[in-house]
Amino acid sequence: MKNKINIVYWWCFLIIYLEMIYKIFILKNFFSFTTLSVLIFCIPLIIFFSFLSSLFNQKINKIITYLISIFLIVLVLAQIVYFKFYSSIFSIFSLTTGGAGQVMEFYTAIIKVILRVWYIFIIVLIPFILFIIFNKYFSYRKFNKKIICKYLATLMISLFLIIFDIKIDKDYYSLNKLLYKTHSPILTINKTGILNMEIIDLYRYIFKFEEKIKDSELNDITYDENKYNVINIDFNDLINNEKDKTIKKMHKYFNNVVPSNKNEYTGMFKNKNLIFITAESFDTIGVSKELTPTLYRMLNNSFIFNNYYQPLYPISTYDGEYMNLTSLIPKEGTWSLAQTKDMNMFLSFGNIFKNMNYNTYAFHNYKYDFYDRNLSHKNLGFNYIGCGNGLEKIMNCNNWPNSDYELINSTMPYYLNKEKNFAIYYMTVSGHLDYNFKRNDISSKNKELVDNLKYSNNVKAYIATQIELDRALELLLNKLEENNLLDDTLIVLTPDHYPYGLSYKELNEVSNIDRSDIFENYHTSLIMYNPNIEKTEINKYVSGIDLIPTIYNLFGINYDSRLLMGSDVFSDKEGMVILSNRSFITDRVKYNSITKKYIKLDDSVDDDYIKKMNDLVNDKFQISSLILDKKYYNKVGEVYENRSK
């Protein structure tokens, strides 16, 4: 056959096809102006892969074409599966730090996701299969000089179009900001495509990337420490003694943040005890008066949070735990909590309460070193015990998942009947996926109690795991009461994330809200319980990053609220929930960062308000990232600790 098809047409089809698949099935905004932007960014990739597959003889070029095609297809499919699993994308950093191996321990759940999106695999793979079948019709010849010059000219034109695209993009998260100042993978994908985002991610991993923050004037303001949760740190002195320009800007930023006010709840639990539980995949759908009476009672008494959200960030459990423990937004593309292991975490509640002479323990009924918790939790001020460094000696650690009831039962002697007050942290595991009655020991254990429910097996298996959590809490309350400690203990229970082991369809079987909604899927429950708290409903929009400042205010702790990304729920600050893609909810609006559309919750919302909130969200992401990159808390830790005494 004389006139074979130039291989450039295959690359043109494959790259654009993969990008559009991601647009249609993941971003779900194919009919938008950003699609044109993605197409422009595809051109250099098409030319690059065309050159790469035409450097040698036909046999080698053919092999190169196959290998690159397979790599690109597998990469995009892997990102699709990851998004369907975690609502985000994986980065090169997370793959190279051992995290991928730990995530793959839950391979059965990943297989379940693949089976759920089988049709996407077929849509992606059929063109490649056809390409293999009809490959003889394609030319794999080495490019001649004429063709090379032609494609170089096309490349130059495409680069001009990209520059033009960058110049005319005036969105809040413009191409200029996403390429040079801000690390937001999902927003970058929306405008450059998934393949270009992978290249950007690789570049930033190799050459490092630091968020670019704006400079500001230093406000000369001193706050009344009797009225605000603040410690008047001399940021001007810190700036004068700092050489790093970025850290100087950070000092100015924190100086200019308005602290949260003290209020009627300040000191409500001063000199009392705290038990803080991050409950694996806890969700409102797992609570019922009949099957989980203790959870039901705790959830519907004391403080009742009607608008509590726990967004899912890229590292799932770990990022949820990070937000709960630090009041910081996870840095995208890294294992944020692990990165704190060698930083002065003076604001963590383990260190705060430890310095107040409390017993501070952290317990986890799974592998003690999973996600490097053995390093991070020690640095957070906890005496940390998990399966592998002591917990296996006092409870059965051989099930999957292990029992929350056994966890509570075996660990309470560490802090009950002691002379000291206690501040205890639990990371539970009974609620972990997979949700079935064959491979989940907790679901199997409680199967009889859910057999009669009119739900699918997966939903029933999930509810069975929450029965175990309920039993653990019942035991906890009874033991505290027996030791006359219940009245003097605040119990906080929050999820790390929603039960993403269930599909939206399965969640909607039992949920009274549409779980496929970009916001409402994260709408869940927070327990903040003490039998002496008068039943109080709170309508402010709240998330995990607000827990630590709220707890500190309740305990009357002297802390600087400006250094945290969340805020005390009971302060007069506006409520805000921030999603991983930088969408947000406030008490006045729901804003979608991908579509740029918003739903007013208050008629006073206008474009200026949206701009102001976008600024705030962007600042919180950038500052949270730089706190890790620059180990910022090391810079202010000593000054803070001296001032707080």
Image (cartoon, grey):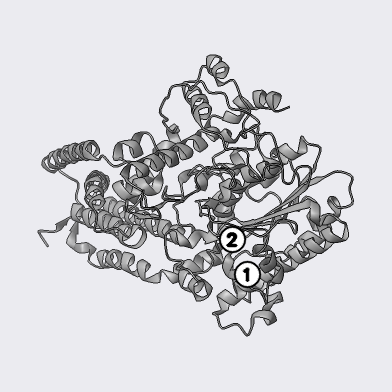
- Looking at the image, residue 562 lies above or below residue 433: above
What's the distance in space between the residues labelled 2 and 1, CA to CA?
Answer: 9 Å
Question: Quadrant of residue 279 in the image?
Answer: bottom right
Specify the amino acid type for callout 1.
Answer: Val
Q: Is residue 501 left or right of residue 135?
A: right
Mark 2 and mark 1 lie on one chain; the one further toward the N terminus is: 1
- Cβ atoms under marks 2 and 1 closer than 8 Å: yes
Disc 2 element:
loop
Q: Residue at x 27, y 51 (%)?
A: 61
Specify the amino acid type for callout 2.
Answer: Ser
- Looking at the image, residue 476 lies above or below residue 386: below
Query: Mark 1 — residue?
Result: 287
Q: Residue at x 83, y 54 (%)?
A: 485
Q: Is residue 259 left or right of residue 404?
A: left
- Looking at the image, residue 446 lies above or below residue 302: below
| Front position in the image: 600 or 283 | 600
Q: Position of residue 623 (x, y in %)?
A: 49, 34
Query: Mark 2 — residue?
Result: 525
Is residue 554 in view from this perspective?
yes
Q: Position of residue 580 (x, y in %)?
A: 46, 49
Kindly give the residue lying farthest to the bottom in the view shown.
Answer: 452
Is residue 362 in view from this perspective?
no
Q: Is residue 450 left or right of residue 613?
A: right
